Image: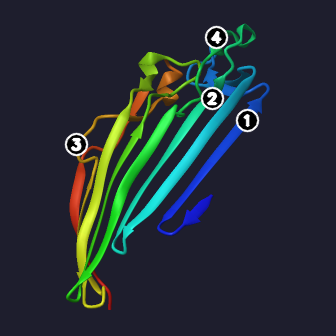
Amino acid sequence: KVATGPVSASLGVYYQVYDNFQVSIPNPDIAGTFITVSAGSASNLGVEGELAVDVADWLNVFGNFGFIDGGIDDDPANGTFAGSRFRLQPEWQASGGLTVNYDFGGFHLFATPTVTHRSTIFFQVPNSALISQGPVTLVNARAGVSFAEERFEIAGFIRNAFDEEFLLDAGNTGGAFGVPTFIPGEPQFYGVEVTAKF
């Protein structure tokens, strides 16, 4: 970690090794149930970093990223699981944005737009392109104004601004019957908030 003047940053690296990594798969003998089996050896190499810069006393810019090269080792001894990525683990993930906090004439203006991105994720091991989600980029924002010593606030927000269609999960109980169920992510959602403190 480092912090100097208006800049703060951190960088982390980790490595993990697993023997007899446990995964759940549909039970071939009893429909609708799962069994736990060993997928063999697995490893996880990751790098994470973040950076924040105070551009002005009212403006902060920030960002972070994560890279993970992990999954079941691509070893013939691991059978059908060999080379599969871990469930719900993207190779790349990053986000960035800025925060505005500006006072003028008894009013306080604030805004925080952000953008997030993640690469393809798989929902089961062994991996299947049919039970996966491709890269997703989402834009969110919240902004407003407060006054009377911040006792009153009016703010607007929007999540998933461009109405991206994506999945949070897939497979689940339906997968045990051969008909995977899919859980969609939140569609575009926006609104206005009014707050009063007494």
Residue named by callout 1: 16
The disc, 4 or 1, on the residue closer to the chain's N-terminal end is 1
Residue type of the residue flagged with mark 4: Thr
For the residue marked with disc 3, what is the amino acid? Phe
The residue positioned 27% from the left and 43% from the top of the image is 187
Along the polypeptide, which appears first: circle 2 or circle 1? 1
Tell whether 117 sits left or right of 159.
right
Q: Estimate the x, y position of residue 97 in percent, counting from the top left.
A: 36, 55
Disc number for residue 51 = none
Please, what is the three-letter code of the amino acid marked with disc 2? Gly
Q: Is 151 positioned to the left or the right of 73 in the image? A: left
Q: From this view, report whether residue 167 is shown above or below residue 100.
A: above
Residue 174 located left or right of residue 157: right
- Give the residue number, with chain letter if any, for mark 3: 162
Q: Which mark is residue 70?
A: 2
The mark closer to the camera, 2 or 4, is 2
Which element type, helix, strand or loop, lies under badge 3? loop
Question: What residue occupies the far right of the structure in this picture?
Answer: 19
Quarter residue 83 falls in: top right
Does the CB distance between marks 2 and 1 fall below 8 Å?
A: yes
Q: Alpha-carbon distance for marks 2 and 4?
A: 16 Å
Q: Position of residue 51 (x, y in %)?
A: 49, 55
Marks 4/3: CA–CA distance: 38 Å
To which residue does mark 4 refer?
Answer: 80
Q: Secondary structure at mark 4?
A: helix
Q: Quadrant of the C terminus?
A: bottom left
